[in-house]
Image: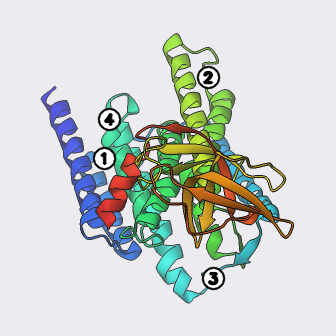
């Protein structure tokens, strides 16, 4: 009994130590070299293995699941590149070379292999195969992999990192935990290497908006989970508690999909945070407005609240006058809280959408982050 207690304390200590090092490297020093991370994780994995002696469980389906994950990885790439037929492609800025091999391919391969072995050790040593600290550490490692791509000193890139990496990593690591505990490390390593390293072996990449990529990375692991659970789990009938978990996961995925669709502003509906007081009384600073994307043939009426673009800046103001000058429609706008009308005159090409309703206070976290980065 005493031995088991010491074992749990050791596992807890190793997980906390890993989290502290990753947190410091990411958010205090703000920089983390991939090669340094690969070396650190390799050493840490060896030390952890020597202390804990991994009790990996073997499954009869390990080979089958490894093959399935390889197929799912290839399908992911095929679907990703097919999306490029709509969005377009661009030349790969990091083609296969000695430099990409040294700075990206080898370090990332080591990071994936080491982190998955760490995951497996911690999960097999934790109660019921669940360890929030290990899960959080894996999310931090994902952030570390992409931290050199997005400069987290800038707000826009930080929000991109948050949307593309963190939210997607939450979904991916739920799947990786599920697979690692039941079928070992090989299926996860194969899938991660395929979906992470492909970009260094192809000449062109799909020019897909980052939030679409995030949407795919959030939804795809859930589809894989459903397939594996149906195909390889022995118990076809689950308890009521597990059914509730299915419902919770489904609700979470639907919620994430809606958020991605709104924030991306690439679909019929979008959302915009109000950053000024020009519409105070109608839409206050810190609120968010949900809008419908403007169709060029759609009629804009006087008193409509519209979202428009002037010199790269988005505004939400009310239409106070509409004039037809030389067979071209001109729109004049004004903020409800402003004393004077806006200096500019708008045309149809300037209009982004029409405001539908507001959500109070929803935009405050974004404004606080903007102030913090300023």
**For the residues bearing labels 3 and 1, Cβ distance under 8 angstroms:** no
> Is disc 4 placed on a helix, strand or loop?
loop
Question: On the picture, is 69 further left or further right than 349?
Answer: left
Q: Residue at x 37, y 28 (%)?
A: 128
Q: Write down the quadrant of residue 114 in the picture.
A: bottom left
Q: Nearer the viewer, residue 162 or 36?
A: 162
Q: Which residue is mark 4?
A: 126
Q: Which residue is mark 1?
A: 53
What's the distance in space between the residues labelled 3 and 4, CA to CA? 40 Å
Question: On the picture, is 114 further left or further right than 327?
Answer: left
Q: Which of marks 1 and 3 precedes in the sequence?
A: 1
Q: Which residue is mark 3?
A: 96
Dot 2 crowding, Cα within 10 Å, few <14, some 14–19, many 20+ = few
Is residue 66 visible in the rendered structure shown here?
no
**For the residues bearing labels 3 and 4, Cβ distance under 8 angstroms:** no
| Badge nearest the viewer, 2 or 3 | 3
Q: Which residue is mark 2?
A: 234
Q: Residue at x 45, y 52 (%)?
A: 166
Q: Which of marks 2 and 4 precedes in the sequence?
A: 4
Check the image and report above or below for 204 versus 134: below
What's the distance in space between the residues labelled 4 and 2, CA to CA? 23 Å
Dot 4 crowding, Cα within 10 Å, few <14, some 14–19, many 20+ = some
Dot 3 crowding, Cα within 10 Å, few <14, some 14–19, many 20+ = some
Q: Which of marks 3 and 2 precedes in the sequence?
A: 3
Give x and y (percent) for residue 170.
Answer: 47, 45
| Badge nearest the viewer, 3 or 4 | 3
């Amino acid at each position: 009994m005493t031995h088991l207690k010491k074992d749990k304390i050791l596992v807890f200590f190793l997980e906390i130590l890993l989290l502290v090092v990753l947190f410091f490297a990411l958010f205090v020093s703000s920089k983390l070299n991939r090669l340094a991370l690969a070396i650190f994780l390799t050493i840490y994995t060896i030390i952890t293995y020597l202390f804990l002696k991994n009790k990996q469980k073997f499954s009869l389906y390990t080979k089958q699941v490894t093959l399935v994950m390889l197929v799912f990885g290839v399908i992911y790439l095929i679907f990703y590149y097919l999306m490029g037929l709509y969005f377009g492609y661009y030349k790969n800025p990091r083609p296969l070379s000695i430099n990409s091999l040294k700075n990206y391919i080898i370090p990332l391969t080591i990071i994936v292999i080491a982190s998955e072995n760490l995951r497996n050790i911690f999960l097999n040593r934790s109660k019921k195969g669940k360890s929030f600290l290990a899960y959080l550490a894996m999310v931090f490692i994902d952030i570390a992999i992409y931290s050199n791509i997005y400069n987290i000193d800038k707000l826009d890139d930080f929000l991109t990192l948050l949307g593309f990496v963190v939210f997607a990593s939450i979904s991916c690591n739920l799947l990786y935990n599920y697979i690692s505990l039941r079928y070992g490390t090989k299926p996860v390593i194969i899938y991660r290497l395929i979906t992470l390293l492909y970009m260094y072996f192809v000449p062109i990449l799909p020019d897909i908006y980052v939030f679409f990529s995030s949407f795919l990375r959030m939804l795809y692991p859930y589809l894989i989970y459903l397939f594996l659970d149906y195909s390889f789990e022995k118990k076809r009938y689950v308890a009521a508690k597990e059914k509730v978990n299915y419902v919770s996961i489904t609700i979470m995925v639907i919620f994430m999909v809606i958020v991605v669709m709104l924030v991306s502003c690439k679909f019929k509906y979008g959302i915009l945070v109000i950053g000024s007081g020009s519409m105070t009384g109608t839409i206050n600073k810190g609120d968010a407005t949900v809008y419908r994307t403007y169709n060029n043939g759609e009629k804009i009426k006087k008193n409509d609240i519209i979202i428009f673009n002037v010199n790269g800046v988005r505004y939400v103001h009310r239409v106070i006058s509409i004039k037809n000058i030389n067979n071209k429609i001109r729109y004049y706008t004004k903020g409800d809280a402003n004393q004077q009308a806006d200096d500019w005159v708008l045309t149809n090409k300037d209009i982004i959408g029409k405001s539908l309703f507001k959500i109070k206070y929803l935009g405050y976290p974004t404004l606080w982050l903007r102030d913090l980065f300023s």
